[in-house]
Image (spheres, rainbow, N blue to C red):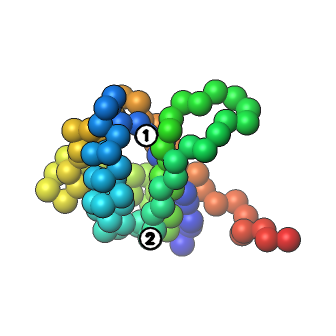
Amino acid sequence: MRRFKLVVFSEPFEGREDEFNEWYTGRHLSDICALPGFTSAQRFKLHSVSMGTQLNKFMAIYDVETDDPDGVVEHMFAMRDTEAMPISPAFNLDATTVMLYEQMTEVVTE
């Protein structure tokens, strides 16, 4: 089975950060992990920018295991805004970037 990281850079609408974070951490991560192909999820908040330009304050990384990565992503988008995966009105979809990366190496620790 091939392994991937789905990386999502996101933003809430102005003044709705608490609502966004509550929904994302308390509901959305689990909704995504319930979908076929997704095995884990973790969120991150931007600490600092050392090089380049900040585009988003929040990032989520999802582990995906599948031999049909395009099908997994297509299914995820098809489930958006359904009972199985409601989207918070605090989530600014226009400021969101979703990218899928295929694993090239195992984790290096030394």
Q: Residue at x 43, y 40 (%)?
A: 10
Estimate the x, y position of residue 50 in percent, counting from the top left: 73, 36
Crowd rating for badge 1 (residues with CA inside 10 Å; few <14, some 14–19, many 20+): many
Quadrant position of the N terminus in the picture? bottom right
Is 48 on the left-hand or right-hand side of 14? right
Question: Given contact means CB atoms under 8 Å apart, are the residues at marks 2 and 1 in contact?
Answer: no
Task: State the mark number for residue 39.
Answer: 2
- The quarter holding residue 3 reads bottom right
Q: Is residue 51 above or below residue 24?
A: above
Q: Residue at x 23, y 44 (%)?
A: 88
The mark that comes first in sequence, 2 or 1, is 1
Crowd rating for badge 2 (residues with CA inside 10 Å; few <14, some 14–19, many 20+): few
Q: Is residue 8 above or below residue 40?
A: above
Is 16 on the left-hand or right-hand side of 58? left
Q: Which residue is mark 1?
A: 10
Say what amino acid the circle numbered 1 marks.
Ser
Is 90 on the left-hand or right-hand side of 37? left
CA distance separating discs 2 and 1: 20 Å
